[in-house]
Amino acid sequence: MKHAILVAFALLAAITMTACSSEYIISTTSGEMIATDGKPKLNDDTGMVEYEDADGRKAQIRQADVKSVIER
């Protein structure tokens, strides 16, 4: 019984952690579509939208160049 509860808890934890990492698409004013890993965040100090691309690299784009951000 304890083993079943432990397995169920481990599965629930894995599903929860997977759900936290959503993929978003940034559509730019030039028509480019950028896939991101996680939700992009606006840096109020620089006016840049910061995101992690699909390859895990951190990148930035000017807020004025972002047309929309949608969750995939």
Image (spheres, helix red, strand yellow):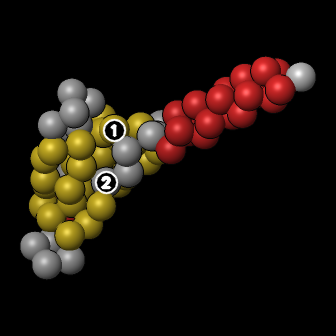
Between 37 and 66, the residue placed more toward the observer is: 37
Residue for badge 2 = 40
Bin the neighbour count of mark 1 within 10 Å (Cα to Cα): few under 14, some 14-19, many 20 and up.
some
Rendered view: 7 above or below 29? above
Q: Position of residue 24 (x, y in %)?
A: 39, 42
Give the side of residue 11 with respect to residue 39, left or right: right
Q: Secondary structure under badge 1?
A: strand
Q: Are marks 1 and 2 in contact (CB under 8 Å)?
A: no
Farthest residue, direction front: 2
Farthest residue, direction right: 1
Give the side of residue 24 with respect to residue 66, left or right: right
Residue visible at 37% across and 45% down in the picture: 38
Quadrant in which the N terminus is drawn = top right
Bin the neighbour count of mark 2 within 10 Å (Cα to Cα): few under 14, some 14-19, many 20 and up.
some
- Res 67 visible: no
Residue for badge 1 = 37
Which kind of residue does numbered mark 2 sit on?
A: Pro
Q: Position of residue 18 (x, y in %)?
A: 52, 34
Between 66 and 16, the residue placed more toward the observer is: 16
Residue visible at 26% across and 30% down in the picture: 54
Q: Position of residue 13 (x, y in %)?
A: 62, 36
Rendered view: 67 above or below 55? below
- Res 54 visible: yes
Q: Whole-Å distance between the Cαs marked 1 and 2?
A: 8 Å
Residue visible at 30% across and 46% down in the picture: 26
Which kind of residue does numbered mark 1 sit on?
A: Asp
Rendered view: 22 above or below 55? below
Residue visible at 13% across and 78% down in the picture: 45
Q: Secondary structure under badge 2?
A: loop
